[in-house]
Amino acid sequence: METSVKVFTQISEFFDYLGADQAASITEVLAPATLDSDPKFPFICSRHYADLIKKSAEPEALMREVLPLMAEREKVPGFVDDPVGDLPAGKSDCVIQKYDKRALVVSTATCGMRCRFCFRKNYPFQNIPDIAGHVGNWLDTHTDIWEVILSGGDPLTLGPGEFRDLVETIAVHGSVTTLRIHTRLPVIRPDIAMQHFELLRELPARFECVLVSHVDHPDELDEESQMVFGHLRFSGWTLLNQSVLLKGVNDNAATLEKLSHKLFTQGVLPYYLHQLDHANGVAHFEVDDDRARELIAEIRTRLPGYLVPKLVREIAGEKSKTPI
């Protein structure tokens, strides 16, 4: 099935695009009776990511990241709506400050895809009509902030004009010397990421610029992600990656080793391997701490230190990530 659709919002249409044979083999592994056809957290998958699934040596691993399952409806003790304490750390409708002299901007509710393990899947997002003005007003009265982190949602889903206005507003605040962007678009919607490139290549002359990609499996990386990362690196961006340790996706040493190698070939350094944030609806992805430590110990014997991500957990109220 060929299609001009860039984003799938219906599982049936998504399966049609994958093709009957591949959809059948994947759903056999994932147990089709467990699919949730009407999830609270909507199904959204980009065509680009569907193409990655088609090409993947482990399509069921990538599928687990996007396919809503009935397990998401289960209430599990210890899993809550705000697992990392975003709401208590909120300083305005779109600014979160957990760490000294750094601020995170929840720039949009929009993502290129709905990852089923998202720690903000229950977050009460608000799309601020004038996000640039709102952030500018907050920074006017917080002149000690040296790093602004653009998060969301995905900040690169903002339109080019809105994104430029936000960055320009941050830039007029002289205390802000570092701009960090967290995004999944290089592997989800590289076409949207590239629409911002004219501005992105200018920014290293104005800030120390850091882009943190969110890649969980080596088969999420392809020629298009390499193009995005290559342009950014050539322009002077520091490129890091953080992954989430996910049962059935990347919870084996071979996959994590391959992920680190492949990131490095695309100019990106592994940064964090996160233990799962305990958001409601994600418990079926959890890998216990003992197994996580075993995996890190094993890949440490296979990789140079600079390719071994730090195994961490975010604990609500703590002033930094907690090593495991």
Image (cartoon, helix red, strand yellow):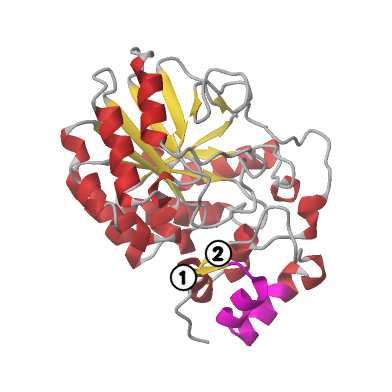
Decide whether the magenta segment is chiefly helix, strand or loop.
helix
Where residue 6 is drawn, which disc sits there? 1
Q: Residue 170: percent from the left, percent from the top?
A: 30, 29
Residue 153 visible within the image? yes
Question: What is the distance, in whole Å, between disc 2 and disc 1 at their CAs?
Answer: 9 Å
> Going from the N terminus, do you reach mark 2 or mark 1 first?
1
What's the residue at 74%, 75% (across, down)?
28
Residue 309 visible within the image? no
Residue at the left extreme, as displayed: 205
Q: Nearer the viewer, residue 6 or 207?
A: 6
| Relative to 6, residue 71 above or below | above
Specify start and end residues of the magenta stretch as a single range.
9-27
Q: Quadrant of residue 126?
A: top right
**160 on left or right of 285:** left
Q: Which residue was labeled with disc 2?
A: 45
| Residue 167 on the magenta span | no
SS at circle 2: strand
Q: Quadrant of residue 75?
A: top right
What's the residue at 46%, 54% (across, down)?
259
Q: Residue 139: percent from the left, percent from the top?
A: 36, 20
**Residue type pointed to by label 1:** Lys
**Residue type pointed to by label 2:** Cys
SS at circle 1: loop
